[in-house]
Image (spheres, rainbow, N blue to C red):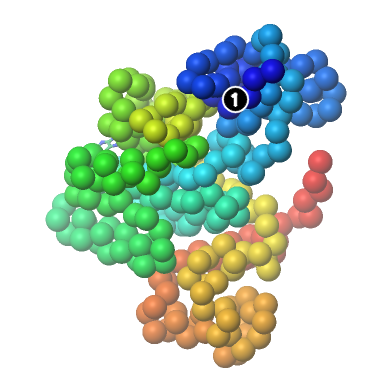
């Protein structure tokens, strides 16, 4: 019996990495009966071409379907498509929820005018202030930035995340030029409503296992309660002990440290507006009956 990590899943077959080698396996017949669906990133036991057991997951993402993820590079286009703080915040809370370390990478900064870059850099600084590692060099693929990013991914299972056409595959190709991942013309990709990257697999990128993933065109993932939501905003978590009421939702409560910080410009307006929007979305959600 061997232990490994599912590197790729293709119509019923699972390729497992164990000690640097790849083994093609298939799921045991009783997996389906038991409702077990192995996914990329699963730690598994296998023998003679069969997966025997899927070990408990540390976490799992639905989009993209990857388990045991340590970190995610949220590839965020500074332009083309136009930068959306809302979309970025949606991805960040989904990652916080799963206890996955987000790293924010701004792509396409090379296409900005000086003034546009100044604005994006200010936004980047805001996210850095919150505590996120942010990569926002004027030339996205300059050596220093790639080296710094790679350094933070060392030895981890990582997923790329971001809108279709954001530049996930392009960034991976820069991190590991021999990957030769297909990248797409954004206009074409968006017009057809298709993704250049279709299947999910873990790639060996220097000392990290990274999933290049198909991007999405919209992101709705509010599988959380309104009470949980403020805990997914690190800047609110830090201030909450100074709110008068325990369990303060930072909306209508008096003597709220978050609202005070907002008025003093310590918290980003866009983050707070997104918080309110997500709060409403969750509050209006139909009850979600878990399978
Ligand atoms: N100028 C510039 N172009 C970029 C940059 N990043 C990506 N692109 C271009 O944007 C297009 C889309 O890039 P991809 O890497 O295919 O995007 P993706 O996020 O992998 O897209 P999906 O696989 O569809 O989810 C390609 O034409 C890239 O060459 C960048 O930083 N600067
Ligand atoms: Mg891609
Ligand atoms: Zn409060």
Q: How many marks?
A: 1
> Residue pushed farthest left?
114
Residue 165's x, y, as percent? 38, 35
Mark 1 Cα shell of 10 Å, populated few (<14), some (14-19), many (≥20): many
* Helix, strand or loop at mark 1: strand
Extreme residue in the top direction:
48
Please tell me in which quadrant of the rendered image residue 151 appears. Answer: top left
User: For the C terminus, which image quadrant?
Assistant: top right
Q: Position of residue 52 (x, y in %)?
A: 74, 20
Residue linked to disc 1: 4
Q: Position of residue 290 (x, y in %)?
A: 80, 46
Judge whether 33 appears above or below 135 on screen. Answer: above
Q: Position of residue 76 (x, y in %)?
A: 37, 47
| The N terminus, quarter of image | top right
Q: Is residue 276 visible?
A: no
Question: Is 79 left, or right, of 159 in this rendering?
Answer: left
Residue 195 higher or lower than 27, as above or below: below
Residue at 62%, 18% (x, y): give it.
14
Q: Quadrant of residue 287?
A: bottom right
At x 49%, y 27%, the residue is: 202
The residue at the point 64 percent across, 20 percent down is 2
58 or 266: which is nearer to us?
58
Question: Toward the viewer: 232 or 122?
Answer: 232
- The reply to whether residue 289 is in sight is yes
Asked if 11 appears above or below 217 in the picture, the reply is above
**Foreground of the two, 71 or 166:** 71
- Give the residue drawn at x 41%, y 66%: 130
From this view, report whether residue 29 is shown above or below residue 249: above
Q: Is residue 141 left or right of residue 207?
A: left
Q: For this rendering, which residue is in front, 39 or 185?
A: 39
């Amino acid at each position: 019996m061997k232990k490994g990590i599912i590197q790729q899943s293709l119509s019923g077959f699972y390729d497992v990495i164990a000690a640097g080698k790849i083994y093609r396996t298939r799921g045991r017949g009783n997996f389906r009966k038991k409702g077990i669906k192995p996914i990329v990133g699963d730690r598994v036991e296998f023998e003679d071409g069969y997966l025997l057991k899927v070990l408990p997951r540390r976490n799992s993402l639905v989009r993209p379907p990857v388990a045991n993820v340590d970190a995610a590079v949220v590839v965020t286009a500074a332009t083309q498509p136009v930068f959306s703080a809302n979309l970025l915040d949606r991805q960040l809370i989904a990652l916080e929820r799963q206890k996955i370390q987000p790293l924010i990478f701004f792509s396409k900064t090379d296409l900005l005018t000086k003034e546009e870059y100044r604005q994006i850099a200010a936004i980047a600084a805001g996210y850095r202030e919150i505590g996120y590692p942010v990569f926002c060099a004027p030339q996205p693929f300059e050596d220093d930035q790639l080296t710094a990013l790679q350094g933070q991914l060392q030895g981890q299972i990582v997923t790329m995340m971001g809108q279709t056409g954001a530049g996930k595959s392009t960034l991976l190709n820069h991190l590991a030029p021999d990957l030769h991942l297909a990248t797409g013309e954004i206009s074409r990709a968006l017009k057809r409503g298709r993704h250049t990257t279709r299947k999910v697999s873990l790639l060996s990128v220097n000392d990290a296992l990274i999933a290049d993933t198909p991007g999405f065109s919209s992101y709705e993932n509010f599988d959380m309660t309104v009470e949980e939501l403020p805990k997914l905003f690190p800047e609110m978590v830090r201030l909450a002990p100074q709110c008068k009421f325990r369990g303060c939702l930072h909306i209508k409560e008096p003597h709220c440290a978050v609202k005070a910080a907002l008025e003093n410009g310590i918290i980003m307006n866009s983050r707070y507006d997104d918080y309110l929007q997500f709060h409403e979305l969750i509050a209006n959600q139909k009850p979600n009956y878990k399978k």
